[in-house]
Amino acid sequence: MSAKIVQNMLKSAPFSRLYMSQIRSKATLPCLKFEYKDLEPIISRDIMEIHHQKHHNTYVVNYNNTLDKLQTAVAKDDTAAIISLSPALKFNGGGHINHSIFWDTLTPHSTKPSDDLNKALIQNFGSCDEFKKQLATASIAVQGSGWGWLGFNPQTKKLAVISCANQDPLFPTTGLIPLFGIDVWEHAYYLQYKNVRADYVNAIFEVVDWDAVSKRFSEASI
């Protein structure tokens, strides 16, 4: 019975293939493909180090601890405990997934969207600049903490801009495959940009790794 409850719980908030694999192998903090200082002046070294080593790592630790509790609850056939762990799995697992995508789609190097992605951006938003404007608007407008996302709808084959609260992962929450996300939790920008979220959001486009975003688009649109 407990195993069935766990399966249904995960289906009710599907954590994607990454989540399902980590049920067995636990999460690990990913290495960055650049140094903490490399995104300056857009994102300071201090923010990058604290964001990666402290905030993201906390999600990893808490997610793994929750998995341990889940395994214990399953072994004891404790239905109430299993169900009560769902919010922690979603929040910490979502934080890990969201940040892993975030790091992968940032770079100190100058890049451009692939021809296919650029064409899709024009078809869906009118222009790349209009897409950036819409994503910036959605990200700045998040109340409290959350993320602004560029996502791909696998049903309609169209791109969409949307925001999610807290650490809600995009795919389980909306059905959109995440291509690029802007973290608008204060820990992502406050040390440098203070309370002016708009300056941070508009600046971050200077360090987007469009090669990585284009790859994600190519894989999602197959």
Image (cartoon, rainbow, N blue to C red):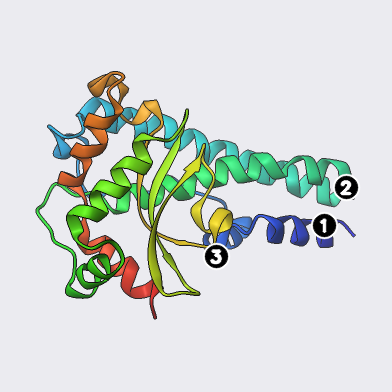
Q: Which residue is mark 1?
A: 5
Question: Which residue corresponds to the image point at 23% horizontal and 75% vertical from the top-left?
Answer: 116
Horizontal side of 152 relative to 36 (left or right) equals right
Mark 3 to mark 1 CA distance (whole Å): 19 Å
Given residues 125 and 89, the one toward you in this image is 125
Question: Which residue corresponds to the image point at 28% horizontal and 18% vertical from the top-left?
Answer: 194
The secondary element bearing badge 1 is classed as: helix
Question: Which residue corresponds to the image point at 34% horizontal and 66% vertical from the top-left?
Answer: 216
Given residues 78 and 138, the one toward you in this image is 138
Q: Which mark is residue 164?
A: none
Q: Which residue is mark 3?
A: 17
The secondary element bearing badge 2 is classed as: helix
Measured as percent of width and height from the top left, residue 24 is found at 63, 59
Given residues 82 and 130, the one toward you in this image is 130
Give the total number of marks visible in the rendering.
3
The crowd level at tag 1 (other Cα within 10 Å; few <14, some 14-19, many 20+) is some
At label 3, the amino acid type is Arg
Mark 3 to mark 2 CA distance (whole Å): 24 Å
